[in-house]
Amino acid sequence: MSEPGAEAPEYPFRNPSALEPPQEWAELREGCPVAPIRLASGDTALLLTRYQDVKEVLSDPRFTRRLDAEGAARVTANESGGVFGRGDSGGGMTGDTHRAWRQLVGKAFTAKRVTAMRPRIQAMAEHLVERMITQGEPADLVSAVGFPLPVWAICDLLGVPDSDRGRFAYWSDTMLSMTRFGQEEIDAAQGEFDAYLVAHVEAKRARPGDDLLSELASMVDGLDGRLTEQLLVMTAKGLLVAGHETTANMIGKMVSMLLADRSRWEALLADRTLVRSAVEEVLRFDANPGFGMPRYLSEEVEVAEERLPAGTTVVCSMASANRDRRQFEGADEMRLDRSPNPHVAFGVGPHSCLGQALARTELQTVLGVLLERLPTLELAVPAARLKCREGLVVGGLERVPVRW
């Protein structure tokens, strides 16, 4: 760790540009892999930047999600702490409760279900790209394709009307706020979100469909109370937020990374079999991922030869870990055919992203459609002029202007 008395830098760090990583990542990986940082709340925590440390901590049950515990650092500038706060979004689930939840949701949220969705995702991606072409260039890829596709997919998965997607985007932004919204606005939005989902869950229990939420609702009454209605609402809320916000942002970042160096796009045009490995490399290479994954330490633990006392809050930077030269040869180079590629963009361990199969399917599908329909696609502004979304715990780009 840094010398006693040294002032902790503000975190998240600023990117030199939207597609370039903060210089602090490399400096800390080499010289201070357990580094004090100051969060938006003003509280301090410790940042982990090396691959092995991040992987070990995310797999270690002594590092918990109890960020509402006494003495835990508050991540956001808001009292509630958003998705990393009171436990309203599931962060408070631990031990047997969390394992039961993962088991039940995992049984319903299967690769088979996602595979069955692929033709519909393909059709929607083609529709959105065709509409963008019809509306003419230059176009904003984020608003034309990046956000509509994942929102549609998660609404389809959960049996939620796609017509409500504008409300979901706002509700999830307030839930993911670090500094963008005030507490009063967040509370009002989350009250609306909860009321909407309670009504939706009740409707699914009364008139089930063939969607994921109906399947989960059918489990509520028959499995020893392991999936209560409150937990079902929490599950729907978490999937709606995580299921569209991160993937929506990733689509814009993916296309920007591939177009920023034209040789990458040309390589994919020449060999479409690279699409799958290119998506994995984009996930690894993402320089604008947002906050990272915070954990609260329930007992004293040693990390990177440092003794961390119980009550410590750490933040795992998966994006920095994904550029660790100890793990990845040529870590600062984007290699579209990289294999193996054991990145930790979706986390690891018992809290790894349940929706990663869906995210991969969406990213691979939209990339394939863009290569097929718009081989001449290019950025309409220099990559250095792309602007990051600010004030949220997830990274993204405000706009991605393109032409063809």
Image: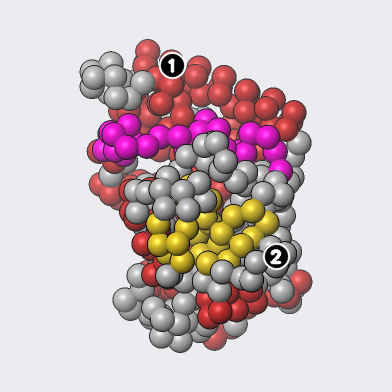
Q: Is residue 75 visible?
A: yes
Image x and y of residue 293, in percent: 50, 54
Q: Secondary structure at mark 1?
A: helix
Image x and y of residue 88, in percent: 52, 30
**Which label is found at residue 376?**
none
**Magenta stretch: residue 85 in it?**
yes
- Residue name at image x 41 percent, y 26 percent: 231
Image x and y of residue 320, in percent: 52, 70
Estimate the spatial distance between the alpha carbons at disc 1 and disc 2, rounded to whole Å.
57 Å
Q: Residues within 10 Å of mark 2 (few under 14, many from 20)?
A: few
Q: Which residue is mark 1?
A: 203
Q: Where, quadrant-wise, is the N terminus in this rendering? A: bottom right
Say what amino acid the circle numbered 1 marks. Ala
Q: Which residue is mark 2?
A: 5
Q: Residues within 10 Å of mark 1 (few under 14, many from 20)?
A: few
- Residue name at image x 28 percent, y 44 percent: 110
Q: Secondary structure at mark 2?
A: loop
Image x and y of residue 196, in percent: 56, 22
The residue lying toward the viewer, choosing from 374 and 224, is 224
Please determine whether, in this image, residue 161 is positioned above or below residue 59: above
Of mark 1 and mark 2, the one earlier in the sequence is 2
Q: Is residue 152 visible?
A: no
Relative placement, left or right, of 172 versus 233 is right
Relative placement, left or right, of 83 versus 93 is right
- Residue name at image x 59 percent, y 55 percent: 45
Say what amino acid the circle numbered 2 marks. Gly
